[in-house]
Amino acid sequence: MVKYKYVLFDFDGTLADTEEVNFVIYQKLAEKYNLRNITIDELGHIKKMSARELMAYVELKKRYLPFILKRGKKLLKHDIRNIKPCKHDIFNTVSVLKSMGISTAIITTNSKTNVQMFLEEQNADIFDFIASSSMFGKESKLKKVIKKEKLDLKDVLYVGDEIRDIHAAKNTGIDIASVAWGYNTVESLKKHKPEYLIYEPCELINICR
């Protein structure tokens, strides 16, 4: 008997290391949409911010967000096959979870096409399904997936790297394992009290047992 029967993963910053390419993409979009220019030196400060705080910091008007995200996903598609996993053993961990009888899936604000291309390149077509949501629609997407799949909340664990992932999981009523290798800093994640904070993917195996 395992503690969690379903483990749902975020994509960017959790499975795929898209930080560098997303920084380059931001620079391109910042010029077009008149956003605040960000330097490499500012990244440490920015990684402490929530998504909404970041939007305010770069002076991004909410009405432009859908257009920027859509354009950003298209630009990322050109480089997606060059993206590497965040951790070399992340997919091995997922395979172990599946061998334990645990179902795995990806819930992301990235496009389903980008995720599928990345998994194909990594020979990691091991997830039961992929679901895509809007920037601030992860909570509603989690709820829809849980309802559609008829999952018991106590059986579900979400794995993500951002503050907004913690909020989405808690508002949905499921536990979250925040990862220390993604977008937000460990200190900023701790402030929002995730059920688990992990430094290596293999820690998920013991958490789920």
Image: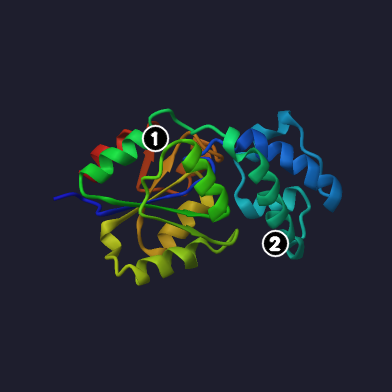
Residue 66's disc number: 2
Residue 118's disc number: none
The residue tagged with tag 1: helix, strand or loop?
A: helix
Q: Foreground residue, 141 or 42? A: 141
Q: Name above or below for residue 144 compared with residue 82.
A: below
- Residue 162 visible here: no
Q: Name above or below for residue 73 compared with residue 89.
A: below
Instruction: Please name the residue shown 26% across and 38% down the image.
Output: 96
Q: Are marks 2 and 1 in contact (CB under 8 Å)?
A: no
Instruction: Please name the residue shown 41% across and 59% down the image.
Output: 170
Q: Foreground residue, 48 or 10? A: 10
Counting from the top left corner in percent of width and height, residue 86 is at 49, 33
157 sits to left or right of 52 = left
Q: Name above or below for residue 177 compared with residue 180.
A: below
Label 1 sits on residue: 90
207 sits to left or right of 66 = left
| Badge 1 amino acid | Ile
- Residue 57 visible here: yes
| Badge 2 amino acid | Pro
Q: Look at the image and tell me in which quarter the C terminus lies.
A: top left
The residue tagged with tag 2: helix, strand or loop?
A: helix
Query: In 3D space, how far apart are the residues under numbered discs 2 and 1 (Cα atoms)?
Result: 30 Å
Packing grade of label 2 (10 A; few <14, some 14-19, many >=20) is: few
Counting from the top left corner in percent of width and height, residue 103 is at 29, 53
Counting from the top left corner in percent of width and height, residue 25 is at 73, 41
Q: Name above or below for residue 153 compared with residue 73.
A: below
